[in-house]
Structures are given as C-alpha cells and as structure tokens.
C-alpha cells in the first residue's frame, strides 16, 4: 500500500488557486494571479497567510508571521513562478513549498492539531479543533451544528504544523448537496484524519 499522507495521495493534482489573507480575514481573500502589485499590501501586516489550492480537494497554507516584506515578496513570486510551470503538481511541492532560504514548509512532524472549518469562512462559521497532540483520537462529537449545515464553500479539515512559520494542509471533507452548497461528510472526515495521523 502507498503512502497515505495527503501530499502523496493527491500528488497528481494541479494548482488551481493561490490566495492570501491579512489578519486571518479569509472571508475576503486576495486572489494572487501573478499580476498584482504586492507592494500595496505585502509589507504592512503582521499576520499574512497564503494558501495554494489543488482543485477543491486539498490545499497548503502558511502564515508568514515574523517574515520581512522582501522575503515575503520573494516567497510569493517564487511560488507563483513555480506554479506557473507547465505540469506543476502537488507531488512537486518539495520544490516550491519552501521559504526563499530553502527551508521546507512541508511537515516533518505529526500535526499539532486537526481543525474542521469552512473554507474562506474559518472565523465566521466557527472552526472546531477535533484533535490535539496527545489526545488518543479525533473527536467529531465536538463539531457544531453550524459545521454540519450546508455552506456555500466546502468544509475542510486542516492539519496544523509547527515550524519556523506555522503551516497547514487542508482536505475538503464535504460533499456537494446542490448548486454551490456543501455539507460535511463524516466518512470523508474520518478518512482524512486517519491519513493525517498515520
């Protein structure tokens, strides 16, 4: 059997979206196309995060806290250049998911937490931590009714990791239930948490 880790499970997925948020405001993300003037907003915030989506199935995230504006700019430009390459896939993440000094942003340790929330509504829908390091198993019973209701964007589980900067891997754990509506799928949540904790 192959490696169950999400980066390897979904290695052939291609990048479809790069977005950023200032101060955790994922409800109003900045879509990064490679054409924007980063100097307008990149140097100011203390809390700047970037996510790369590979279809709607999986995404990588990093919070660039404590990183200088020139290094942030280089990270985003290097990332955009790598993702624009023909054939870039999630399986190539080791080549592009790194800081400009070469520090990998891929996890080298087990996750610290598993959180369930709504993509681009993490705060407003109220994300819930279903597992912390040291706990025996994830506890889906902690999920709120809000997270179990339909949403206009997918419900995801994020595995958070320590490091020189905080990182996460998100996995869509919802199913479509109508036009532009998604509902949490507990079986998919179980599959994702098993893979993250393997």
Image (cartoon, rainbow, N blue to C red):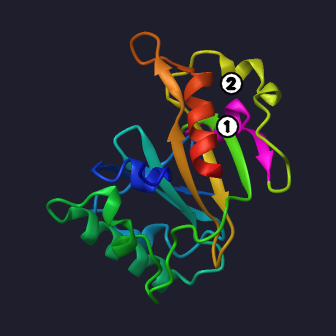
The residue closer to the viewer here, 189 or 29, is 189
Residue 24 appears in view: no
Residue 53 spot, x, y in % from top left:
40, 48
Residue 192 appears in view: yes
The residue closer to the viewer here, 68 or 122, is 122
Please tell me in which quadrant of the rendered image residue 93 appears. bottom left
Mark linked to residue 116: 1
- Specify start and end residues of the magenta stretch as a single range: 120-132
| Residue indicated by mark 2 | 147
Circle 2 packing at 10 Å, graded few (<14), some (14-19), many (20+), is some
Relative to residue 134, is residue 145 depicted above or below? Answer: above
Residue 138 spot, x, y in % from top left:
76, 39
Q: Let me know if residue 130 is in the magenta part.
A: yes
Tag 1 secondary structure: strand
Lateral position of residue 77 relative to residue 21, left or right: left
> How far apart in space, not on screen, are marks 2 and 1 (Cα)?
8 Å
Say whether disc 2 or disc 1 marks the residue closer to the N-terminus.
1
Q: Name the residue at 47% across, 17% down.
A: 181
Q: Are marks 2 and 1 in contact (CB under 8 Å)?
A: yes
Residue 126 spot, x, y in % from top left:
74, 34
């Amino acid at each position: 059997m192959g490696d169950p880790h999400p980066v390897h499970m979904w290695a052939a997925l291609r990048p479809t979206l790069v977005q950023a948020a200032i101060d955790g405001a994922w409800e109003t993300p900045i879509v990064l196309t490679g054409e924007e003037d980063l100097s307008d907003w990149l140097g100011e915030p203390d809390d700047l995060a970037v996510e790369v989506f590979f279809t709607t199935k999986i995404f990588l995230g990093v919070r660039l806290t404590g990183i200088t504006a020139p290094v942030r700019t280089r990270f985003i430009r290097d990332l955009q250049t790598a993702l624009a390459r023909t054939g870039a896939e999630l399986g190539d993440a080791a080549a592009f998911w790194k800081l400009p000094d070469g520090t990998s942003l891929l996890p080298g340790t087990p996750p610290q937490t598993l959180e369930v929330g709504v993509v681009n509504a993490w705060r407003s829908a109220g994300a819930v931590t279903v597992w912390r390091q040291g706990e025996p198993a994830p506890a889906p019973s902690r999920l709120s009714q809000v997270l179990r209701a339909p949403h206009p964007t997918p419900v995801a589980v994020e595995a958070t990791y320590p490091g020189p900067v905080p990182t996460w891997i998100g996995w869509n754990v919802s199913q479509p239930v109508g036009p532009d509506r998604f509902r949490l799928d507990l079986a998919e949540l179980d599959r994702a948490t098993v893979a993250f904790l393997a």
